[in-house]
Image: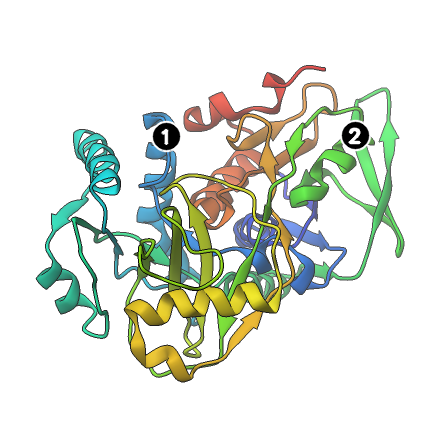
Amino acid sequence: MENKTVAIIGGGIIGSSIGFQLSSLGNKVIIIDKGPFQESCSAHSFAWVNASSKSPIGYHSLCRSSVNKWPKFAKQLGTEVGLDLNGTTKWENSEEGADLARQRVETLQSWDYPVQIVDEEFIKAKNPSIHIKNMTFGQYIPNEGHVEPKRVIDACQFNIRENGGEIINDCAVTGFEKDSDTHNITGVITSSGTIACNTVIIAAGTGTQELAGLLDIYIPLLESPGVVAWTDPQPKTINGIIMSPAISDGTYTGNDEQSEVHIRQRVDGSYQMVNERGGIGNHHEQNDDSQEKAEDLLKHLTEYFPHLNTSTAIAEPVGYRPMPEDKFPVLGYDENWSNVYISVMHSGVTLAALVGEYVATEINYKVQIPELEEYRPSRFKK
């Protein structure tokens, strides 16, 4: 087996996790990223590590395998990455919400997923600071949680450098050097010069469609804006992911029967907040990144967490998630350019632990992993 020089376009959580695994196998990895991190998809992720929102069962199983692999992956990285697998807690306060949630729980239980139906006492025991109103249904998923993408990326890239690789930031890819006889890419043309390589991985998030198009590879993506907001650091009060339902008697702007707010707390104590509509798995579009919207989300949270009424809301500019046209991952070599590998997906944080290992295995050992067969780029035709 000959070690390769692998150019990875995109330094988000997927590109970095693949690079970490490849460099650990002895390959020379060069990550090329247009940067900075604050403008990346990973920076705007809610970072929910889960399989409960994933369907059908095949995709659910792929995500479930990655959820299970996260503790090992975090340990391999050798530093604090903010992994908190203390469960997903969710409750409803309407009969309609309870009916929908119960149906989803029954489906997940039929797939042997460890979701539990719980009462108010259970939720308060897990998170004593929660003030619950009019609960009609509660659920708890013990194996899920969240992680901090920037910590993961920094750890991956530190290890890549330690293994002899390079990270080139603030660098735009403008083209490729091609060998038409062998149908190989021999170099990546960038704003910093041409980078010679044996293999190219396009893991550029929302930029994947444009970059693949330079090679006449068709990877259709949907526009999927999302908005998160933050608070200033607070004392540690919650574990895992909390999904709080709409509040029927809330008087703040934007509150209605679908106005859920999902929250998590990072290592530094800050809360991340995201507005979801219509329940788990609804990849809606959000565009309002105003300070007023961030303050409304915080007002929602104070209904359930009164101690947050002295915290400060911090708005975050809208981010755009990489969403393949059929909403499933795209993973595999192109049919024409034999050394170009595509890796793009919405569930990058959940799948990073598994995808990094699977892609590195396929590239390093020239094998095809059966679990990835239905996600190949060849399924898309112009």
Residue 342 — which label? none
Q: Nearer the viewer, residue 116 or 133?
A: 133
Residue 133 x, y percent position in the rendering: 21, 61
Q: Is residue 250 left or right of residue 5?
A: left
Q: Residue at x 57, y 67 (%)?
A: 292
On screen, residue 375 above or below 78: above
Q: Does residue 272 show up?
A: no
In the rendering, at what x and y percent does residue 198 appear? 73, 38
Which of the pair 28/205 is nearer the observer? 205
Q: Check disc 1 and give the amino acid type.
A: Ser
Q: Residues within 10 Å of mark 1 (few under 14, many from 20)?
A: some
Is 328 in front, or is 138?
A: 138
| Above or below, comparing residue 95 to residue 133 in the picture | above
Amino acid marked by disc 2: Gly
- Way the structure is coloured: rainbow
Tell me if I can see residue 264 in this picture: yes
Tag 2–tag 1 contact (CB < 8 Å): no
Question: How far across and down, in percent of the image, does residue 240 sit?
Answer: 30, 62
Q: Which residue is mark 1?
A: 55
Q: Where 38 sits versus 336, above or below?
A: below
Which residue bears the numbered disc 2?
A: 213
Q: Residue 6's image quarter?
A: top right
- Residue at the (21%, 64%) spot, across then down: 132
**Residue 72, relative to residue 300: is it above or below?**
above
Mark found first going from the N terminus, 2 or 1: 1
Which residue is at a point 56% across and 43% down the rendered structure image?
A: 285
Give residue 295's position: percent from left, percent from top.
51, 70
Mark 2 or 1: the one toward you: 1
